[in-house]
Image (cartoon, helix red, strand yellow):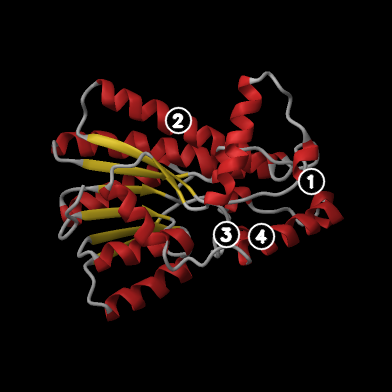
Amino acid sequence: MKEFKDKVAVITGGANGIGLAIAEEAIKRGMKVVIGDIHKEGLERVEKIFKEKNADFITVYMDVTEFEDMKMLAEKTIEKYGQVDLFFNNAGVVVPGDIWNIPLNDIDYIIYSNLFSIVYGLKVFIPIMEKQKTKCRIINTASVAGLLSSPGMPTYHMTKFGNIGLSEAVDLQLQEKESNVRLSVFCPGYIQTDLHNCDKRRPEKFKIDPNEPYYQSEEYKEGLKKAHYVITTGIPIDSIGMSVFQAIEDEQFYILTHPEYMPVIGWRVKNILDGKNPDVKFFKS
């Protein structure tokens, strides 16, 4: 896809971080934009910013962990604009901590937010796009954490590996049927976003129970500190929207932002091919 003017972009998690950066770039390119998010204050802020830019957009308050909300996002898009050209399956969260200590509620929260939401988006938007018979693309936001392993945040790795595997397989299916829809998977490293504050936007059904001992533990507190550090010291977000759209123009499947992770990705693949075991010493050297 090379031309974007007057085409329609739908973005989940579009009121903050990567989603907002993508929305801003889409508007710069003359697109009509639909922003779905669970963060009401963020949506209100976006509305003010985009009205000042005279952008053609709508916002939709929705929860990506609910399939009916994903359907509603699509329905409102078609009702307003009649088509979808780019769908950014972007919303996501992070949960730190050891798998044997994390409450099941947290595991459900990250699986529904990072993986089921991707499934819901594909299930809802692919049929709509295929009916259009125009060139369309879906961009699933994963992470470099889906291409390599580390000792930290196992639930995050789990969902991002799942996202990438799902994206690869679905794109192959779409190729096989010669569909007009294609996929990309966005695999950034640490970027200066608001991801470390995602707990402030938890759906009520995944609300933290303050009486749960885990949330009083040092492990939990240290996990929050680490997440805050790695995200706030990540690369600036300014160029992310442009990078993603350049990759769309180039029809790239894997969209990467941090070349310094390439050796780690390669090391993991080489270890698999060589029959070697994962070794934590690599991360301590």
- Is label 3 or label 4 in front? 4
Query: Are the residues flagged by discs 1 and 4 in contact, CB closer than 8 Å?
Result: no
Q: Position of residue 159 (x, y in %)?
A: 57, 38
From where the camera sits, is residue 108 visible? no
Assess disc 2: are there few (<14), some (14-19) or many (≥20) residues with their C-alpha within 10 Å of its C-alpha. Answer: some
What is the spatial separation of the Cα atoms under label 1 and label 4, in whole angstroms? 19 Å
Kind of residue at badge 2: Leu
Going from N to C along the chain, the mark reached first, 4 or 2, is 2
Kind of residue at badge 4: Val
Going from N to C along the chain, the mark reached first, 3 or 4, is 3
Above or below 2: residue 127 = above
Kind of residue at badge 3: Leu
Q: Residue at x 29, y 58 (%)?
A: 34
What is the spatial separation of the Cα atoms under label 4 and label 2, in whole angstroms? 27 Å
Residue at disc 4, secondary structure: helix
Going from N to C along the chain, the mark reached first, 1 or 4, is 4
Q: Which residue is mark 3?
A: 195
- Is label 4 or label 2 in front? 4
Picture quadrant of residue 62: bottom left
What is the spatial separation of the Cα atoms under label 2 and label 3, in whole angstroms? 23 Å
Going from N to C along the chain, the mark reached first, 2 or 3, is 2
- Is label 2 or label 1 in front? 1
Q: Which residue is mark 4?
A: 230
Q: Which residue is mark 2?
A: 166
Residue at disc 1, secondary structure: loop
Above or below 37: residue 122 = above
Is residue 141 shown left or right of residue 197? left
Query: Are the residues flagged by discs 4 and 2 in contact, CB closer than 8 Å?
Result: no
Q: Which residue is mark 1?
A: 285
Query: Are the residues flagged by discs 2 and 1 in contact, CB closer than 8 Å?
Result: no
Q: Residue at x 41, y 30 (%)?
A: 168
